[in-house]
Structures are given as C-alpha cells and as structure tokens.
Amino acid sequence: MNEQTIERALLQRMFEAAIAAAQPALCVPPALPEAPKGRLIVIGAGKASAEMARAVERNWPGPLTGLVATRYGYAVPCERIEIVEASHPVPDAAGLSAARRMLDRVHGLSADDTVLCLISGGGSSLLPLPADGISLEDKQLVNQALLTSGASIGEMNCVRRHLSAIKGGRLAAACHPARVVTLLISDVPGDDPRDIASGPTIGDASTCADALDIIRRYRIALPEHVLEVLRSGRGESIKPGDPRLARAEVRMIATPQMALEAAAQVAAAEGVTPHILGDSIEGEARDVGKVMAGIALQAGRRGQPFATPCVLLSGGETTVTVRGQGRGGRNVEFLLSCAIALQGEAGIHGLAGDTDGVDGQEEIAGAWIAPDTLARAWEHGLRPRDSLDNNDGHGFFQALGDSVVTGPTLTNVNDFRALLIVR
C-alpha cells in the first residue's frame, strides 16, 4: 500500500467515524421520553427522520402511531410509523401532502397525549406547507432563489419560517395541549434549534421584518404577493413564551461537534494529532478553502501553529454563490479552492463531504485531494481555476475518479472537512 493510499484510508475512516457517531440507532434510544397516560404520536421530517423513526419503533415498548417525511431514497422499513418520501432541496407535492397530513394527525390531542417529533436537517424542504396566499410553486421559487443567493443557512431559514404554515413553532402550537418532545439531529452551525428544519416546534424571536431585510440584502427577486405576506405581518412566526409552547421541550441528540470528536479519536489512535478548528464554520466555500490551505501550509512548512503529523478538522456549513453553470456542491468547491491554493504541496491530503451523503444536489458526498490532484487534472485536460469559476467541483473530481460516494447515510450532521498533514 503506497503512502497516498494509506493517507486516503485514514481520512476515510475518520469520515466514517463522524457519520457513525450520529446514527439514530445510537443516539435516539437514550433520549426517548417516558410513556404518556394517553397516546404517543410520532411525527417528523429530515434526511435522518426515517432511521430515527425505526430507532423509536425498536425501543418503544408500548403502542404508537406516526408519520414522518424523508428524502427520496432515505426511507427504511417501519411497521407502525408511516414513512413518506419527498423532494430535497427543492420541495414537491409529496412533501406538501405530508405536511398537511401531519397537522391533521396532531389536531384534537389531549393533555394526556405526547407528540414525539423527530427532526433533522433537510426538514425545511420536506415540510413545504406554504402560508395562506402562497403556492407550492412559490415555495419552490423561493427555495431555489435562496440556495443560489449566498445567504447563510440561518438567513435562509429565517425567510422560510415566515413563509410557512408549519415551521417557526407552528407545528408545536398545533399539538397544544399535548406534550411535545422534539429530538434534534443538528446540521446547522451553532446548533440553533430554530434553524434545524426551520424549527417547526421551536419558538422564533425573528420577525417578518428580519426576513425582508435578508431578501433585500441578497437582492432576491420574489413575486409581490409573496413579499406582501411579509410586509403585512401575516407570516409572523410563533414567539418564545407563547402559551401553546409551554409543554414543548427539545433534546439535542447529535451534533457536528460530536461527529468531529469521533473522527479525532480515530486520528489520535493512529498517532496523528487532531485539531478541531470549529464545528460551525461558515462563509464562501472557496474562501474557507483558501484559509484552511494557508493553515495547512504553515503547519507543514513551519510546524506552526501545529506540529506534524496532524489533521485539521472542521464542520459547519459553507455557502456557494452560484455564478457558473457547473454541478456545484459546497464541499467540492471548498476542496477545489483548497487544492489550487496548496499548489501540489507535498504531504497534504484532504477529504470533505456532507455527512448525509449528498453534497449540493448530487448523490455524491464529497471528494478527496492529494499532492498530485492538480497535476492529474492537467493530464486530463482540466483547468482547475476554470472549474472553480464555473462552480463545477463535482465535474472536476468525478473526472479524476476522486469523488466520495457513500449512498444515503441515514443521518445528517452537516459538513465534514479534514486536512491531513504528514510531513
């Protein structure tokens, strides 16, 4: 096994450990509530929600019913909880129908009942119930515009909450007077519960005016009747302290930090010192790539700020302001920018991927880089800077055979980035 194969195998094991740490089978059972006097109704949405539902079924001793929505291809067999597949990241009619049925399921509950809400990343698109006066087509337009605007995930979800009939605490309010216990797998920087699936069971202090400011800041063009929902205040979310949320509680069961710590343990066991630089790093993917490359170069050449061998680990969610016609993906954009900045520096290898197995809109988790990445690209007739300018990270790495493909991981704790410096 040559040196490059050894480094790639170590990076792969770190990525796998990060994903394993957030598996619902591990983190759901300890967080389950006690049995209620009345019924247990399970609802939820997200890329991990089906696997979360299966973990509930396998560990809940009494009766239950339920409905959760997950991404196409992410369903798993359940016996008592209905699993609906819908579209992500752009919502579709299946998600709309699931959201309506979910609200119907929690209508008319009593104080003796408990609603167990299973929420993970992706829920914003999978529960697309528009506010009055807004159509599904409007929501699709808004989602597409937000995804290409360069707005952060927190900013995008602020807009979504104020154009929804189910997000921003509205789902929990609909469950009143039942108890609501929400289990969250975080995919957002800072683990703010409001931003995980746009917080359907979380009180939201942001306002319609905040949403309008974001739309102006990024010059997002929306139809007048959509803007009117915000200008009129009709889209206002449920605020913290609302009496309908008095019996709603949140349990954070998996986070990006937990995943990074699991990866760090793998590195340490191999004699490589891990350094977690942050679990909530945001910004333009290409800019973050340049910065991380600069730190890696200083470590490799000067032993500063870290002695080698070491690995620089980070998580969070970067953004890509789309200007080209390529296939996108924030992790591959990060890596391509990083590779260009490294210029083939010896001894530096990297992996970046989305822990849900989907980077952008591709069924590809991410990619690898190595000291020979740019040289092999030129041999294949690729121009790395042109690929970056065209937002075509997926096309670039797929042509080199360096894509990382995991298939559906059934969880989601956002992005995983690792730069391994071995000299």
Image (cartoon, grey):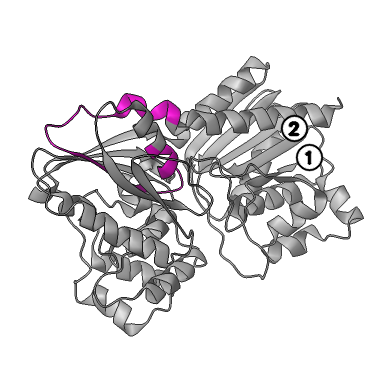
The residue carrying mark 2 is: 8
Residue 297 appears in which quarter of the rendering? top right
Q: Is residue 192 above or below residue 303?
A: below
Q: Tell me if 69 is positioned left or right of 413 in this view.
A: left
Q: Tell me if 114 is positioned left or right of 166 in this view.
A: left
Residue 385 appears in which quarter of the rendering? bottom right
Residue 43 visible, this angle = no
Residue closer to the observer: 300 or 270:
270
* Residue 137 spot, x, y in % from top left: 41, 76
* Residue 204 spot, x, y in % from top left: 23, 53
Residue at the image position 49 percent from the left and 64 percent from the top: 147
Q: Disc 1, disc 2: CB below 8 Å?
A: yes
Residue at the image position 40 percent from the left and 28 percent from the top: 27
Residue kind at label 1, given as amino acid type: Ala
Give the residues in magenta: 25-53
The residue carrying mark 1 is: 370
User: In the rendered structure, does residue 280 fall within the stretch colored magenta?
Assistant: no
* Residue 15 spot, x, y in % from top left: 61, 33
Residue at the image position 63 percent from the left and 26 percent from the top: 306
Q: Tell me if 106 is positioned left or right of 263 in this view.
A: left
Residue kind at label 2, given as amino acid type: Arg
Q: Which residue is most to the right?
A: 379
